[in-house]
């Protein structure tokens, strides 16, 4: 327990200022985590398919490059087509490399795709939330105006708060009141009661944060009610994705018979152990942000 607490403190000292200041320090941290996550994923596959060891260092490098390219698109204004071209190239090249491995299968090709998508694109999308510059959008779809403030730091904090609240309350209520198993074949300790509690409190905390920090600003009761319903739904879906991401990671570990993805964070496991929930929720949330920008711009 002491090791776990100490690691959490050190992580906070390093990660929180990096997220706050953003830009290049955040890019360096995100790229490093992406490469490590890619290595963890490939190492997991390697435990069942030892011949994949040859690709254990190549594919993670592709994951890191994708996070850098996503940064260049979002911050430096590089054409999005270059990112699409690079992602397709890395996926095809990763799949192609398996051909040169003796006795490789179609499953190995699928593993390359999963690694690039999970450790490259998802991490890059989560990072993209922080890259957003403060932009005030006014919706004309409501009876009165609703201002949406797309500030990267606040949106990232909103996402992280929902993730933490969902995890904490799901664990607490599951430990105290859990009776019905949520997914016994995947994660025996998770309960339906814990899942519902995580969903409820994650939604409440996220919605309250969105209004208190003025991510959403309304000027009438009608627009407030409509905006509150939409934010509630978004927060609820994000909270659901948090739990889904955790279950997907658990399924992968159970399938490949490993306890943790890695050991980079003593007491917590690897990058994918620590941020599995955030990746699924963050990737989904970034897609929502893009949709909002398309609708309101």
Image: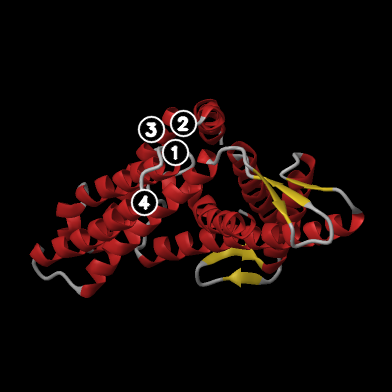
Does dot 1 land on a helix, a strand or a loop?
Answer: helix
* Image x and y of residue 199, in percent: 70, 60
Contact flag, marks 1 and 2 (Cβ < 8 Å): yes
> Circle 4 is placed at which residue position?
120
> Circle 3 is placed at which residue position?
28
Query: Sequence order check: which comes first, mark 4 or mark 3?
Result: 3
- Say how the picture is coloured: secondary structure
> Circle 1 is placed at which residue position?
75
Locate residue 225: give its quadrant. Answer: bottom right
Tell whether 7 sits left or right of 204.
Answer: left
Query: Sequence order check: which comes first, mark 1 or mark 2?
Result: 2
- Residue 68 visible in image: yes
Locate residue 263: give its quadrant. Answer: top left
Res 23 label: 2
Tell whether 62 sits left or right of 70.
Answer: left
Query: Sequence order check: which comes first, mark 1 or mark 4?
Result: 1
Does dot 2 land on a helix, a strand or a loop?
Answer: helix
Query: Sequence order check: which comes first, mark 2 or mark 4?
Result: 2
Mark 2 is surrounded, within 10 Å at the Cα level, by few (under 14), some (14 to 19) or many (20 or more) other residues, namely: some
Looking at the picture, does residue 29 appear above or below residue 164? Answer: above
């Amino acid at each position: 327990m002491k090791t776990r607490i100490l690691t959490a403190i050190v992580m906070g000292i390093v990660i929180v200022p990096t997220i706050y200041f953003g830009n290049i320090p955040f890019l360096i941290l995100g790229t490093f985590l992406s490469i490590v996550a890619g290595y963890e994923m490939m190492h997991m596959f390697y435990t069942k398919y030892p011949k994949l060891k040859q690709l254990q260092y190549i594919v993670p490098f592709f994951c890191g490059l994708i996070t850098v390219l996503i940064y260049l698109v979002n911050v430096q204004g590089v054409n999005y087509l270059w990112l699409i071209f690079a992602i397709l190239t890395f996926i095809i090249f990763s799949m192609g490399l398996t051909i040169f491995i003796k006795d490789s299968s179609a499953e190995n090709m699928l593993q390359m795709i999963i690694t690039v998508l999970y450790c490259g694109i998802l991490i890059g999308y989560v990072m993209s939330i922080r890259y957003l510059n403060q932009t005030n959008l006014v919706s004309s779809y409501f009876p009165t105006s609703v201002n949406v403030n797309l500030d990267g730091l606040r949106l990232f904090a909103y996402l992280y708060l929902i993730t933490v609240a969902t995890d904490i309350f799901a664990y607490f209520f599951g430990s105290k009141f859990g009776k019905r198993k949520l997914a016994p074949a995947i994660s025996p300790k998770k309960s339906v009661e814990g899942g519902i509690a995580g969903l409820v409190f994650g939604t409440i905390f996220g919605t309250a944060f969105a209004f208190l920090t003025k991510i959403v600003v309304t000027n009438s009761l009608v627009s407030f009610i409509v905006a509150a319903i939409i934010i509630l739904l978004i927060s609820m879906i994000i909270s659901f994705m948090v739990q889904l991401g955790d279950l997907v990671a658990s399924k992968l570990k159970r399938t490949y018979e490993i306890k943790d993805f890695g050991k980079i964070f003593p007491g917590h496991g690897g990058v994918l152990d620590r941020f599995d929930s955030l990746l699924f929720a963050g990737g989904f949330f970034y897609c929502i942000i893009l949709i909002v920008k398309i609708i309101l711009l």
